[in-house]
Image: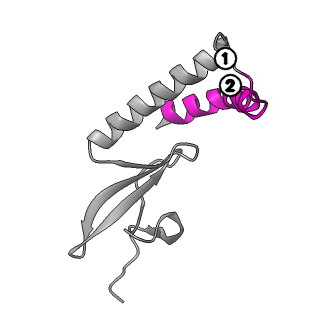
Amino acid sequence: MEQLVIMAGNLEEAREHVKGLAERGEMNTGSAIGTRYIEGLAAISSLVNSIQEIGCIVKSIDEGLVDFPHVREGREVYLCWKYGEPDIAYWHEVDAGFAGRTPLDKDTSS
């Protein structure tokens, strides 16, 4: 995820350049920045696919969010990790998303 977050951040300037060209309706097929942007997108896509092939779900590249399917108290939930956190310490219901994160050590049986 660190590599993804860095790659996405590095592409921001190129994205703005390509977006500006598109908004002005300009064709700039020889743009080094455009080429770097396309290559960067392909590299990001490949890395996301590699992460997802091992069973993880990339939720946000910009925020570095990853969910991991998990069985908790007999039902499927997601363990949730955000880039920069030292460990996987949260979970949430499948339909709850990041806003529903609950610490793993919190008792949910009450």
Q: Is residue 23 magenta?
A: yes
Q: Residue at x 35, y 39 (%)?
A: 51
SS for callout 1: helix
**Callout 2, which amino acid?**
Ala
Q: Which SS does the magenta portion mostly show? A: helix
Question: Which residue is identified by label 2?
Answer: 14
SS for callout 2: helix
The disc at residue 33 is 1
Crowding at dot 1, Cα within 10 Å, few <14 / some 14-19 / many 20+, comes out as some
Q: Which residues are magenta?
A: 3-26
The outermost residue toward the left is: 74
Q: Residue at x 42, y 59 (%)?
A: 89
Tell whether label 2 touches label 1 (CB within 8 Å): yes
* Figure quadrant of residue 48: top left
- Residue 41 lies, with reference to residue 106, above or below; the image says above
The picture places residue 58, in percent across and down from the top left corner, at 42, 47
In this rendered view, identify the residue nearer to me: 86 or 71. 71
Crowding at dot 2, Cα within 10 Å, few <14 / some 14-19 / many 20+, comes out as some
In the displayed structure, does residue 79 sit left or right of residue 1?
Answer: left
**Callout 1, which amino acid?**
Ile
In this rendered view, identify the residue nearer to me: 79 or 49. 49
Q: Residue at x 54, y 68 (%)?
A: 99
Tell me how many marks there are.
2
